[in-house]
Image (cartoon, rainbow, N blue to C red):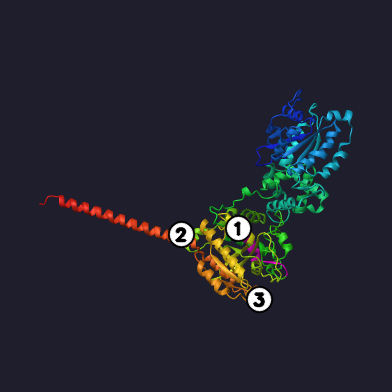
Amino acid sequence: MSSNFAVATHRSTVRVVVIGDSATGKSSLIAAAATDAFPETVAPVLPPTRLPAEYYPDKIPVTVIDTPSSLEGKAKVEDELMCADAVVITYACDQPETLDRIEGFWLPEVRRLKVKIPVIVAGCMSDLRDEHYPINLQSMISPKMQEYREIETWIECSAANLVQVTDVFYYAQKAVLHPTAPLYDQETQTLKPRCIRALKRVFTLCDHDMDSALNDTELNEFQVKCFSVPLQPSEIENVKRIVREKVPDGVNRHGITLKGFLYLHYKFIEKSCLETTWTVLRKFGYNDDVELLKENLPVPSRKAPDQSVELTSEAVYFLKGVFSSFDSNKDGALQDSKLDELFSAAPESPWDEPPYTDAVERTELGDLGLAGFLSQWDLMTLLDPPQSLAYLIYMGYTGDPSKALRVTRKRSINLKKQHTDRHVFQCFIFGPKSAGKSALLTSFVGRPFQPTYNLTSNQCYTVNTVNQQWGIKKTLILREIQEDDVKELLSRKESLATCDIAVFVYDSSNEYSLRRASELLMDVARAGEDSGYGVPCRLIAAKNDLSSYPMEIKDSEMVCQTTKIDAPIRISVKENDLNNVFRKIANAAEQCHLSVPETEQGRNMKHYQQHLNRSIILASVGAAVAVIALVAYRAYASRKSKPSS
């Protein structure tokens, strides 16, 4: 495969900062690279120097920043490093102590600042090395590059003789535009997993006849797409020969297999031709983290905070087809190994980390059924629409990506219409500690009751489908809100915008628990009134297997009457007596105009608004009557003033 193609990149320039000890040749190196001549005199610190785009095959200019070496200039060096794309650290080949400072000061300094940028180590004044300080350069630098993986290139140059001067900045630019770290593990000398997964996706997309090999036509189409230059038949045969010699099963009677395709890219990278692999990846939409560029994903934008994003029916149909194709034994569930295979062309499995771990129901064998599979997608789409769309594409979604997701109607409009267009509801679960919130969430996904209480850390989600009347299914997402996090949550004006319903759980055997749950209910009600994002609310009396405290029923009824919400839903997770709680939560979310709590302040404001509206109406009617009377009087006066005939 050819590699004579400038890679497409969003960068307009590459910013390279040069640091190092005093008198190591920083300024002379920069001046010689810019003018192609050795400067007889040079300023202690040069102004920013631009090396034009035509200097480089990728046609991207380089901006070089010189820095002072004095202690007084340390702050400037730190500031410049924080804005750098790459850093060149210099030492003088005729001053061994400056070489020791690379490892003893400069590399640790870069690490201390936590700047994740490639490092080029440049030995300046190499024309003086052989004469005064002969050394085996390779044996010296190998262990240092093993220890400091951020070093991309170690090069020695001479500004006086113009030897490898421009190469220093070429390698710095190359390390930025075509970084090694995301693609290749130098320690194991293997392609990194993300690189392999991305190349597998590229291979699959180019394998049009789906025979697990790239034939000559497919290989040529791939070559033209990426490099705009076709391969001659002799070149294709030469590529196959090279692969066959090293990887016998890298070529079969149909063409180059995935194993052969990966081997070719391994060789490109091994020979420092990373630009070839990066050209391929960027042509297929990948960024420097070997992920699809999110800015290129046609994700629908939410116009208002109280809108959400859901999968469309086309996307759900595709996901059902994918699930079926990987369910090889047709038992209606996927093992973890099948899920790994399903996501093998994605950067990694998206559900191995919170909040997706343990968020859905599993079979007794720990496998994932279709309902859980789709529920997991619903959760990911709600929380991170760009990631959801990206993973649809990784999996081979062939439809129009712009039609895979949809934006729901504003909740404020749903409230006015007394009807919602949503298929996915998010429920915030509030309540004091030990009230039974976590037990409620785990019961939603079929996990057994745990008698010991474990404090939930961070945010916890569970998601499942709920059967409603007429066979309609809705997806319900439960999000547990820790008691200590409520104040901070409600301090943000739009915090309730994404909430379709709020549930308040209390321990029915504990008087304090109900009192605290009712306080949280009022806090949420006030926040909803103040922000305009009021939400339906329900009380849940948990631990119904225990004896309730004497006044619990009366107290809970008083709370509901005061706020004008429905009576508590009484459940016992321990005895698996859930009283259709999840269907009732979903129904309350769907009937969004009901069960929205009122506070005293809210009622007063409503009464004031009603009184104001009536006053305005009466004033308008009075004004209209006055106008009519005035018109009638003028008409009467006009008739009276006319002479009789």
| In front: label 3 or label 2 | 2
Q: Name the residue under label 1.
A: 487
Which callout, 2 or 1, points at the residue further toward the start of the chain?
Answer: 1
- Residue kind at label 1, given as amino acid type: Lys
Other residues around mark 3 within 10 Å, as few (<14) / some (14–19) / many (≥20): few
Of 515 and 179, nearer the camera is 515
Q: Distance between the residues labelled 2 and 1?
A: 24 Å
Of 396 and 236, nearer the camera is 396
Question: Percent position (x, y) of residue 122?
Answer: 79, 35
| Secondary structure at numbered mark 3 | loop
Q: At 25% across and 53% down in the image, what residue appears?
A: 630
Which callout, 3 or 1, points at the residue further toward the start of the chain?
Answer: 1
Query: Is the residue under label 1 in contact with that under label 3 (CB below 8 Å)?
Result: no
418 relative to 259, above or below: below
Res. 605 mark: 2
Q: Mark 3 points at which residue?
A: 575
554 relative to 321, above or below: below
Other residues around mark 1 within 10 Å, as few (<14) / some (14–19) / many (≥20): few
* Image: magenta residue range: 365-384
| Secondary structure at numbered mark 1 | helix
Query: Is the residue under label 1 in contact with that under label 2 (CB below 8 Å)?
Result: no
**Is residue 422 in view from this perspective?**
no
Q: Distance between the residues labelled 3 and 1?
A: 33 Å
Which callout, 3 or 2, points at the residue further toward the start of the chain?
Answer: 3
Other residues around mark 2 within 10 Å, as few (<14) / some (14–19) / many (≥20): few
Q: How far apart are marks 3 and 2 (CA)?
A: 44 Å
Picture quarter containing residue 392?
Answer: bottom right
**Is residue 15 in view from this perspective?**
yes
